[in-house]
Image (tube, grey):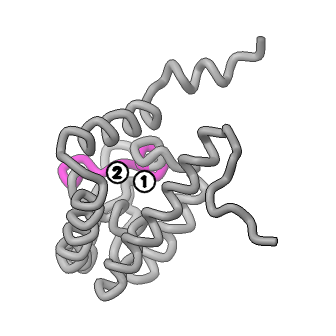
Amino acid sequence: MSLPLRSASPCIASAMRAASRRLTLLYDEVMAPSGLRLTQFGILAELERRASEPPTVSELAEILTMERSALGQSLRTLETDGLVALGRDQRDARRRPVRLTPAGRKAAARARPYWEKAHAQFSRFYGDAAALSELRSTLRDIAENRALADAFARRD
């Protein structure tokens, strides 16, 4: 007996996780020659965008919508590889900003063309720019919507 390829589950979260896993696998495959996985590149790219005001681990976890412990594991690998550094804020010693190192900037620059290739391949496959923009907007809204998080946090 063969199982159907698509799940009949009505669960939106399961469908989104499956889509996320599929895209991550596809991007990772295209990005393999860079030596970075999509998740690592995402962290480096975000730190690059925030170089003037490096975030703490907690702030970065919130920005990336990640569990702090999962981000910590990824950061340990990136730190071991010399791509990021956890520092001390000169104004507040309790703050430990995460900074991109020069090697991290080079790694992000080396990986960017592979990410762009994967992104272009998905864009061509998925369809027109308006549909892609709407998909991205919907996904960002789900990820960043505080009201959604608050609705799930209520205990009614």
Please name the residue shown 25% across and 51% down the image: 127
Q: Quadrant of the C terminus?
A: top right
Residue neighbourhood size for the residue with mark 2, other residues' Cα within 10 Å, grouped as few (<14), some (14–19), many (≥20)? few
Q: Pick the residue in front: 26 or 85.
A: 26
Q: Residue furthest right?
A: 1
Q: Secondary structure at mark 1?
A: loop
- The answer to whether residue 82 shows anywhere in this view is no
Q: Pick the residue in front: 135 or 55.
A: 135
Please name the residue shown 17% across and 74% down the image: 113
**Badge number at residue 96:** 1
Instruction: Tell me if residue 106 is in the magenta stretch.
Output: no
Image quarter of residue 5: bottom right
Please name the residue shown 43% across and 63% down the image: 23
17 shown above or below 134? below
Horizontally, residue 10 falls left or right of residue 72, namely right
Residue type at mark 1 is Arg
**Is mark 2 in CB contact (under 8 Å) with mark 1?**
yes
Q: Residue furthest top?
A: 156
Q: Earlier in the sequence, mark 2 or mark 1?
A: 2
- Label 2 and label 1: CA atoms lie apart by 6 Å
Q: Pick the residue in front: 104 or 29.
A: 29
Q: Pick the residue in front: 66 or 96.
A: 66
Instruction: Tell me if residue 53 is in the magenta stretch.
Output: yes
Q: Which residues are magenta?
A: 50-60
Residue neighbourhood size for the residue with mark 1, other residues' Cα within 10 Å, grouped as few (<14), some (14–19), many (≥20)? some
Q: Secondary structure at mark 2?
A: loop
Horizontally, residue 133 falls left or right of residue 98, namely left
Image quarter of residue 35: bottom left
Location of residue 42 in the rendering, given as x and y in whole percent from the top left corner = 35, 61
Q: Quadrant of the N terminus?
A: bottom right
